Amino acid sequence: MKRKNITIILNLVFALALSLLPFDQGFAQWRTQNIVTSAKETDLSISPSRGPDDAPVEIAVFSCFQ
Amino acid sequence: MLEQVLEKYPDQVKLIFLSFPLANHRFAKKAAIAAFAAKKQGKFWEYHDRLFENIERVNDQKLLDIAREIGLDMEKFKRDLNDLKIVARINQDIRLGHYLGVRATPTVLINGSLSRARTLEEFQADVEIELERARKNSVVKGGQKG
């Protein structure tokens, strides 16, 4: 009896995980699209910079002040 | 080290600052906001340099002290510390960093590509490659025009 209950619960968990999969994939796709879009919109020309604007080499540095 | 690269190539290299305050550093985001508030008064790099000189002692009071020391208008500076546009700008940098897979700082992009350079010599080598590429491109463009 106990084993049967465990099997039922495991099946339910498996079915639940399967049913959530499309939502999870959809969310991941939505998230990726939004992050990529916003990242591409980042306008580096308004970031603080040193050196000539028409320099052939641009060195961008991700920095943390601590 | 990047300052040395700038000194060596004053007409050919532009250094761009991107914020990536690490989550485990308590005052990092506040410091980034403060630096951008200083930018609004035309003193970003002065503030930036002073922050890095005091990197071990950054706290709320230090952020104000540096602003005062470099002669910022304190009323405006304090107002700008709550400027949501500044926060949005910093968040944009952070999103760009996440998109590019940045996990630590400093992380360097040279003409948009992640650089693995760690020493001055390696950075110079990367810059030379990009300068050579730019020279070739300008020759090709010149040839197409002619």
Image (cartoon, rainbow, N blue to C red):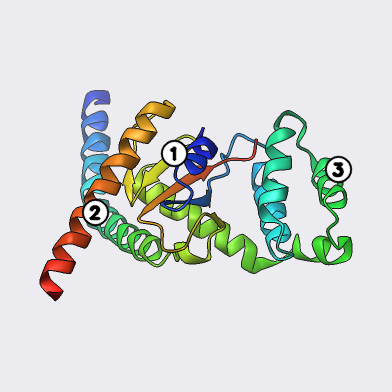
Residue B30 is at least partly visible in this image:
no
Q: Amino acid at mark 2?
A: Arg
| Looking at the image, residue B3 lies above or below residue A18 | above
Where disc 1 sits, the SS reads: strand
Where disc 2 sits, the SS reads: helix
Q: Nearer the viewer, residue B72 or A31?
A: B72
Residue B24 picture location, percent across and down: 60, 34
Residue that extends furthest to the front in the rendered view of this protein? B146
Q: Distance of mark 2 from mark 1, alpha carbons?
A: 26 Å
Q: Distance of mark 1 from mark 3, alpha carbons?
A: 28 Å
Q: Chain of mark 2?
A: B
Q: Which label number is shown at residue B107?
A: 1
Q: Which label number is shown at residue B61?
A: 3
Q: Which label number is shown at residue B135?
A: 2
Decide if residue B135 is on the left or right side of residue B68: left
Q: Chain of mark 1?
A: B
Labels 1 & 3 near each other (Cβ < 8 A) = no
Neighbour tally class for label 2: few under 14, some 14-19, many 20 plus, Cα within 10 Å: few
| Looking at the image, residue B14 lies above or below residue B102 | below
Q: Amino acid at mark 3?
A: Gln
Q: Nearer the viewer, residue A12 or A41?
A: A41
**Which of the two marks, 2 or 1, is nearer to us in this view?**
2
Q: Amino acid at mark 1?
A: Thr
| Looking at the image, residue B120 lies above or below residue B127 | above
Q: Nearer the viewer, residue A18 or B116?
A: B116
Q: Earlier in the sequence, mark 2 or mark 1?
A: 1
Neighbour tally class for label 1: few under 14, some 14-19, many 20 plus, Cα within 10 Å: many
**Which of the two marks, 3 or 2, is nearer to us in this view?**
2
Decide if residue B137 is on the left or right side of residue B98: left
Q: Chain of mark 3?
A: B
